Amino acid sequence: MNRRPRLSARLKLTLSYAGFLLVAGVLLLAVVWVFMLRWVRDDDAPSLQEKFGGVIIVGPGRSDLLRGFVPAAATALACLLVVGLLGGWILAGRMLAPLTRIASAARLAANGSLSHRIRLQGPRDEFRELADVFDIMLEQLESHVAEQQRFAANASHELRTPLAISRTLLDAARNDPTPDQGKVIERLHTVNTRAIDLTEALLLLSRADHGSFTREPVDLSLIVEEAAETLLPLAEKRRITLDVTGNTTQTVGSAALLLRMVTNLVQNAIVHNLPADGTVTIHTESQHGASVLRVENTGHALPAELVPTLTEPFQRGTGRVRADEQAGVGLGLAIVHSIVRAHDGTLDLTPRPTGGLLVTIRLPRGG
C-alpha cells in the first residue's frame, strides 16, 4: 500500500526538541522583561529635575530598553533555535539508534533471514527489552520454520513410499500375464491402509498444532478406561498385561484429542514392549493442582540420548517391533506432544533403569 511521504520520527523529535527549547527561551525572556519593567520609569512620567530642580541622573526609559533588549533577545532566540535543531537532531539519532537496528533485523527476517540477532548492549531500558524480546521471537521462529521444513520433508518421503510401492505392484501386475490377483489386491490394500493412516495422522497433528477444538470438562480416568478397553485385544495378542489404576481426574479440553493422546501412548507402550509377557501400567491422579497421567511399560533399555528425539515426527524409537506388527507411521508421540502442548500441559519422558519408558503428562485441572 502506497503512503504519502511524511516526516520521519527523527525529524519530528528534532522539531519537538527545538520547539520546546524555543518556547522555554521565549518564556524566560518574557519573565526577564516583566521583571525589568518594575524598575524602569515610564517615558511620560515627570522627572525629579522638573519638580525639584537641580541636576540628577535619570535611568533609561522603556523605549531605550526596547531598543537595547529586543535585538539581543532575538539573537538569543535564534541561537536557541539553532542549538535546539542541531542538538535535537543528534539526540534523536542516538535515541532512535536501537530502533534502527531492530528495524534492520525485522527487514532481514521479512526477507527470510531468521538467523540474525540484534544482541543490543547497554542499560536494560525499554529499547533493550524490546530488542531482547525480538531476538527471542526470531529464535522461536527459526526453530519453528526448521521444524516445519524437516516435517514437510519427512512427510513427503513417508507419503511417497506407499505410492511408489503401489506403482511398483501395479506395474508388476500389468507386465505379468498370469498375476495372482488376490495377492496383489491384498498387498495394495495394506499399502493403501498405511497411506490413509499416515494422512489421517498428519491431519490430526495439524489440528492439534493449531488448537482448533472446543474445550469442555473431561474425566481423564474415563478416557484411560476407554483406550485400555480398545487396546486390550492387542495387549492380549502380545501377552502384555494392562494395569489401569487411579481415581477420577478432571481436566479441560477435547475429549476426542485426549482419547487419541492416551490411545497413542498405550499403543506405543504395547508395541514397543519387548520381549513379550511384559506390563503396561496406566495411572491417573490429581496432584498439586494438575491432572497427571502416567504410562509406564517394560521393555528394552533406551539410550538417554534417544529419549528427547522420540517426540519428533517420524521417529520410531529403537525400531524393534514384532514381525507380525506394523511399525506405525512414526507420528505417535509427535501427536501426543502436540495434543499436550495444545492443552497447555507438559510431557516428560524418562527411561526406566530396568528397561522401558515412563511417560508423565500434566494437564490443567478442570473445575
Image (cartoon, rainbow, N blue to C red):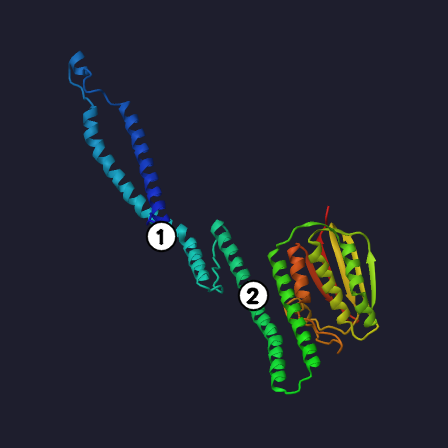
Residue 90 visible in the picture: yes
Q: Position of residue 285 (x, y in %)?
A: 79, 54
Could you tell me the amino acid type at mark 1?
Asn
Q: Position of residue 313 (x, y in %)?
A: 63, 68
Q: Quadrant of residue 349?
A: bottom right
Determine whether the residue tagged by mark 1 lies in a helix, strand or loop.
loop
In terms of sequence position, does the residue under pointer 2 or pointer 1 come before the other? Answer: 1
Q: Position of residue 242 (x, y in %)?
A: 82, 65
Which residue is tagged 1? 2
Labelled disc at residue 181? none
Q: Residue furthest top?
A: 51
Labelled disc at residue 148? 2
Q: Position of residue 129 (x, y in %)?
A: 51, 52
46 with respect to 222 (left or right):
left
Residue at 62% over, 84% down: 172
In front of the other: 23 or 153: 153
Above or below, 80 relative to 150: above
32 with respect to 263 (left or right):
left
Could you tell me the amino acid type at mark 2?
Gln
Residue 352 visible in the picture: no
Circle 2 packing at 10 Å, graded few (<14), some (14-19), many (20+), is: few
